[in-house]
Amino acid sequence: MRPDSDPPIVGIGASAGGVKALQTFFEALPDEPNAAFVVVVHLDPEFRSQLANILSSRTSMPVAQVEGTEKLENNHVYVIAPNSRLVIADHTISAFPFDEPRYQRAPIDLFFRSLAEQHTDGLAYAVVLTGAGADGAIGVKSIKESGGREVGVPPPKKIVSRTGRPRLAPASPISRRRAAWHTCCKRPPLSPRCARMRRR
């Protein structure tokens, strides 16, 4: 990639309980994966977040919590701050206060939609780690419609390919069905829906 070219942007959404999954994800990446990563997590607006510090111990890439406006740079990680939403525009990422009350907020969707609007060049990727409810579904659709990709994350040992680049595999209906089965059916008794999934 040329130094002056825009890097691919990987938007990562997760619930508040997705910190471990994020740590595993970044630990498996090479030192220079040739992408910019934006992490959007459901955070408690009443408390300071330590997510940037936690992730900085798992990657050699610079990790910053976005408080104002930052230039998007290759091989950097940008993390959402509590009580804010992230927006991409003109090669920068900015934090803004929410317009919606707390129970109506969807920070993952808001960021993914912003990413889709700014990147119609196929260099936008959407990753959802752990359960974030319905948040992210609309944004993922927007990214796919703009030419980007929804990606699923393989097991940690397979995240990095032989070339040293992150191996972000397209999410398939089969993998989504298996994930749904695991979430729904890991504890008995089986619901009728789970029983149908298990027979597949």
Image (cartoon, grey):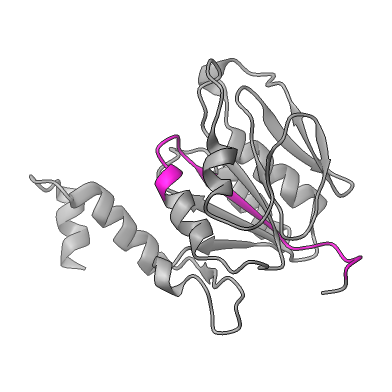
Work out whether 65 lies above or below 75.
above
For this view, does 192 lie left or right of residue 133?
A: left
Magenta stretch encompasses residue 31: no
What stretch of residues is rendered in magenta? 3-20
Count of number-bearing discs? 0
Q: Foreground residue, 71 or 101? A: 71
The residue lying at 47 percent from left, 51 percent from top is: 23
Q: Quadrant of residue 189?
A: top left
Residue lying farthest left? 189
Picture coordinates of residue 182, whole percent (x, y): 25, 55
Picture coordinates of residue 41, whole percent (x, y): 54, 37
Residue lying farthest bottom? 162
Q: Foreground residue, 80 or 106? A: 80
The residue lying at 59 percent from left, 44 percent from top is: 138
Quadrant of the image containing the N terminus: bottom right
Q: Quadrant of residue 155?
A: bottom left
The residue lying at 48 percent from left, 65 percent from top is: 171
The residue lying at 42 percent from left, 51 percent from top is: 21
Work out whether 43 lies above or below 128.
above
Magenta stretch encompasses residue 6: yes
Q: Foreground residue, 197 or 79? A: 79
Picture coordinates of residue 92, whole percent (x, y): 84, 44
Quadrant of the image containing the C terminus: bottom left
Work out whether 74 lies above or below 108.
below
